[in-house]
Amino acid sequence: MSERASEPSTPSTTVTAAGPKVVLLAVIAVLVLAADIITKTVAVAQLENRDPLELLGGLVYLQLVRNPGAAFSLATGYTWVLTIVAIAVVVVIIRVARRLRSVGWAIALGLVLGGALGNLTDRIFRAPGPLQGHVVDIVSLFAPDGRVWPVFNMADSSIVTGGVLLVLLALLGRELDGRRTSARGGAEEGADSA
Protein backbone atom coordinates (compact mmCIF):
# COMPACT_ATOMS: atom_id res chain seq x y z
CA MET A 1 0.00 0.00 0.00
CA SER A 2 1.40 3.39 -0.92
CA GLU A 3 1.87 6.22 1.53
CA ARG A 4 -0.64 8.34 -0.37
CA ALA A 5 -3.41 5.73 0.01
CA SER A 6 -2.93 5.53 3.78
CA GLU A 7 -3.05 9.30 4.33
CA PRO A 8 -6.21 10.73 5.90
CA SER A 9 -8.58 12.82 3.81
CA THR A 10 -7.32 16.29 3.07
CA PRO A 11 -9.36 19.49 2.97
CA SER A 12 -9.34 19.29 -0.83
CA THR A 13 -11.63 16.22 -0.70
CA THR A 14 -13.99 18.21 1.51
CA VAL A 15 -14.16 20.98 -1.06
CA THR A 16 -14.73 18.43 -3.81
CA ALA A 17 -17.66 16.89 -1.87
CA ALA A 18 -19.32 20.29 -1.68
CA GLY A 19 -18.68 20.97 -5.37
CA PRO A 20 -21.94 19.69 -6.91
CA LYS A 21 -24.08 21.50 -4.31
CA VAL A 22 -22.17 24.75 -4.81
CA VAL A 23 -22.57 24.38 -8.57
CA LEU A 24 -26.33 23.87 -8.07
CA LEU A 25 -26.49 26.99 -5.88
CA ALA A 26 -24.57 28.99 -8.51
CA VAL A 27 -26.69 27.75 -11.44
CA ILE A 28 -29.93 28.63 -9.64
CA ALA A 29 -28.60 32.06 -8.67
CA VAL A 30 -27.51 32.81 -12.25
CA LEU A 31 -30.88 31.66 -13.67
CA VAL A 32 -32.82 33.80 -11.17
CA LEU A 33 -30.60 36.81 -11.86
CA ALA A 34 -30.97 36.39 -15.64
CA ALA A 35 -34.76 35.98 -15.41
CA ASP A 36 -34.98 39.03 -13.15
CA ILE A 37 -32.90 41.23 -15.46
CA ILE A 38 -34.84 40.09 -18.54
CA THR A 39 -38.28 40.64 -16.97
CA LYS A 40 -37.29 44.06 -15.66
CA THR A 41 -35.84 45.08 -19.03
CA VAL A 42 -39.02 44.00 -20.83
CA ALA A 43 -41.19 45.73 -18.22
CA VAL A 44 -39.34 49.03 -18.58
CA ALA A 45 -39.59 48.81 -22.38
CA GLN A 46 -43.25 47.76 -22.52
CA LEU A 47 -44.95 49.17 -19.41
CA GLU A 48 -43.40 52.62 -19.02
CA ASN A 49 -46.11 55.34 -18.98
CA ARG A 50 -48.91 52.81 -19.49
CA ASP A 51 -51.92 51.84 -17.43
CA PRO A 52 -51.62 48.54 -15.57
CA LEU A 53 -52.19 45.52 -17.78
CA GLU A 54 -54.91 43.26 -16.34
CA LEU A 55 -54.38 39.49 -16.54
CA LEU A 56 -56.41 36.50 -15.38
CA GLY A 57 -59.57 38.51 -14.83
CA GLY A 58 -57.93 40.96 -12.44
CA LEU A 59 -56.06 38.40 -10.35
CA VAL A 60 -52.74 39.77 -11.66
CA TYR A 61 -51.80 43.22 -12.95
CA LEU A 62 -48.55 44.07 -14.69
CA GLN A 63 -47.31 47.59 -14.14
CA LEU A 64 -44.07 49.44 -13.76
CA VAL A 65 -43.27 50.72 -10.27
CA ARG A 66 -39.90 52.05 -9.19
CA ASN A 67 -39.43 51.21 -5.53
CA PRO A 68 -36.81 53.07 -3.47
CA GLY A 69 -37.54 50.91 -0.41
CA ALA A 70 -37.56 47.30 0.64
CA ALA A 71 -40.44 44.87 0.37
CA PHE A 72 -43.79 46.42 1.20
CA SER A 73 -42.15 49.81 0.46
CA LEU A 74 -40.52 49.85 3.88
CA ALA A 75 -37.42 51.95 4.54
CA THR A 76 -37.93 54.14 1.47
CA GLY A 77 -35.51 56.74 2.81
CA TYR A 78 -32.77 54.21 3.44
CA THR A 79 -31.95 52.89 0.00
CA TRP A 80 -28.21 52.94 0.68
CA VAL A 81 -28.72 50.84 3.84
CA LEU A 82 -30.71 48.29 1.82
CA THR A 83 -27.84 48.16 -0.67
CA ILE A 84 -25.36 47.39 2.11
CA VAL A 85 -27.69 44.71 3.54
CA ALA A 86 -27.98 43.09 0.09
CA ILE A 87 -24.19 43.08 -0.30
CA ALA A 88 -23.86 41.50 3.16
CA VAL A 89 -26.37 38.77 2.24
CA VAL A 90 -24.42 37.96 -0.93
CA VAL A 91 -21.12 37.78 0.98
CA VAL A 92 -22.58 35.56 3.73
CA ILE A 93 -24.08 33.12 1.22
CA ILE A 94 -20.80 32.89 -0.69
CA ARG A 95 -18.89 32.26 2.57
CA VAL A 96 -21.24 29.52 3.87
CA ALA A 97 -21.30 27.79 0.48
CA ARG A 98 -18.01 26.08 1.39
CA ARG A 99 -19.86 23.98 4.00
CA LEU A 100 -22.80 23.21 1.72
CA ARG A 101 -23.69 19.50 1.40
CA SER A 102 -27.50 19.69 1.16
CA VAL A 103 -29.50 19.91 -2.07
CA GLY A 104 -32.35 21.68 -0.25
CA TRP A 105 -30.03 24.31 1.19
CA ALA A 106 -28.35 24.73 -2.20
CA ILE A 107 -31.71 25.44 -3.85
CA ALA A 108 -32.86 27.80 -1.10
CA LEU A 109 -29.59 29.72 -0.95
CA GLY A 110 -29.44 29.88 -4.76
CA LEU A 111 -32.91 31.47 -4.83
CA VAL A 112 -31.99 33.99 -2.14
CA LEU A 113 -28.62 34.78 -3.74
CA GLY A 114 -30.11 35.25 -7.22
CA GLY A 115 -32.88 37.47 -5.86
CA ALA A 116 -30.49 39.54 -3.76
CA LEU A 117 -28.22 40.02 -6.78
CA GLY A 118 -31.20 40.99 -8.95
CA ASN A 119 -32.37 43.76 -6.64
CA LEU A 120 -28.77 44.76 -5.89
CA THR A 121 -28.21 45.24 -9.63
CA ASP A 122 -31.08 47.75 -9.64
CA ARG A 123 -29.73 49.52 -6.55
CA ILE A 124 -26.32 49.92 -8.19
CA PHE A 125 -27.22 50.69 -11.81
CA ARG A 126 -30.65 52.37 -11.86
CA ALA A 127 -31.62 55.98 -11.22
CA PRO A 128 -31.23 58.07 -9.20
CA GLY A 129 -27.66 56.77 -8.87
CA PRO A 130 -25.23 54.14 -7.59
CA LEU A 131 -26.20 52.52 -4.27
CA GLN A 132 -29.48 54.50 -4.31
CA GLY A 133 -31.18 53.08 -7.40
CA HIS A 134 -34.86 52.26 -7.31
CA VAL A 135 -35.85 48.62 -7.80
CA VAL A 136 -38.16 47.87 -10.72
CA ASP A 137 -41.30 46.09 -9.52
CA ILE A 138 -43.78 44.62 -11.98
CA VAL A 139 -46.48 42.36 -10.54
CA SER A 140 -49.46 43.51 -8.48
CA LEU A 141 -51.93 40.93 -7.18
CA PHE A 142 -55.72 41.40 -6.97
CA ALA A 143 -55.66 45.14 -7.77
CA PRO A 144 -53.39 47.62 -9.55
CA ASP A 145 -50.95 49.89 -7.74
CA GLY A 146 -50.31 47.47 -4.89
CA ARG A 147 -53.54 48.35 -3.09
CA VAL A 148 -54.12 44.77 -1.93
CA TRP A 149 -50.62 43.29 -2.10
CA PRO A 150 -47.37 45.20 -2.68
CA VAL A 151 -46.01 45.24 -6.23
CA PHE A 152 -43.08 42.83 -6.59
CA ASN A 153 -40.63 41.34 -9.09
CA MET A 154 -38.88 38.04 -9.87
CA ALA A 155 -36.08 38.77 -7.41
CA ASP A 156 -38.55 39.42 -4.58
CA SER A 157 -40.37 36.17 -5.36
CA SER A 158 -37.11 34.22 -5.32
CA ILE A 159 -35.99 35.75 -2.03
CA VAL A 160 -39.32 34.93 -0.36
CA THR A 161 -39.45 31.39 -1.81
CA GLY A 162 -35.85 30.72 -0.77
CA GLY A 163 -36.49 32.18 2.69
CA VAL A 164 -39.56 29.98 3.21
CA LEU A 165 -37.56 26.93 2.10
CA LEU A 166 -34.74 27.83 4.53
CA VAL A 167 -37.23 28.06 7.41
CA LEU A 168 -38.80 24.75 6.40
CA LEU A 169 -35.40 23.05 6.24
CA ALA A 170 -34.51 24.43 9.67
CA LEU A 171 -37.83 23.25 11.15
CA LEU A 172 -37.27 19.79 9.67
CA GLY A 173 -33.81 19.64 11.24
CA ARG A 174 -31.91 19.67 7.95
CA GLU A 175 -28.47 21.17 8.33
CA LEU A 176 -26.37 23.08 5.81
CA ASP A 177 -23.82 20.27 5.83
CA GLY A 178 -26.46 17.64 5.00
CA ARG A 179 -26.90 16.23 8.52
CA ARG A 180 -30.26 15.93 10.20
CA THR A 181 -30.82 17.25 13.69
CA SER A 182 -33.22 15.21 15.77
CA ALA A 183 -36.13 16.77 17.66
CA ARG A 184 -34.04 16.40 20.84
CA GLY A 185 -31.48 18.81 19.42
CA GLY A 186 -28.65 16.35 18.74
CA ALA A 187 -27.21 15.70 15.31
CA GLU A 188 -28.02 12.32 13.86
CA GLU A 189 -25.29 10.32 12.18
CA GLY A 190 -24.95 10.27 8.42
CA ALA A 191 -25.30 12.99 5.86
CA ASP A 192 -28.51 13.54 3.97
CA SER A 193 -28.64 15.01 0.51
CA ALA A 194 -31.87 16.93 1.11
Image: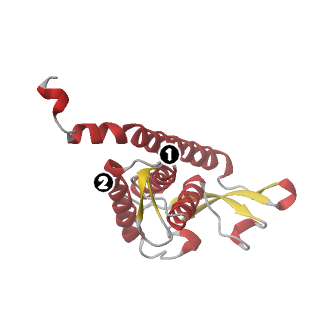
User: Which amino acid type corresponds to the residue marked 1 in the rendered image?
Assistant: Leu
Q: Secondary structure at mark 2?
A: helix
Q: Which residue is located at x 44 percent, y 53 percent?
A: 113
Decide which of 60, 107 is in the foreground and name it.
Answer: 107
Residue 93 rendering spot, x and y as whole percentages: 37, 55
User: Which amino acid type corresponds to the residue marked 2 in the rendered image?
Assistant: Arg
Lateral position of residue 32 relative to residue 179, left or right: right
Residue 179 rendering spot, x and y as whole percentages: 43, 55
Return the residue at label 2.
Answer: 95
Q: Residue furthest right?
A: 57
Return the residue at label 1.
Answer: 33
Q: Which residue is located at x 59 percent, y 58 percent?
A: 161
Residue 80 rendering spot, x and y as whole percentages: 37, 68
Q: Which residue is located at x 60 percent, y 49 percent?
A: 44
Instruction: Report how many numbered discs are placed on residues in the image.
Output: 2
Task: Please state, as top left, top right, bottom left or bottom right, where the N terminus lies in the image.
Answer: top left
Q: Which residue is located at x 34 percent, y 62 percent?
A: 88
Q: 10 Å neighbourhood of mark 1: few (<14), some, or many (≥20)? A: many
Q: Residue furthest top?
A: 1
Lateral position of residue 91 relative to residue 152, left or right: left
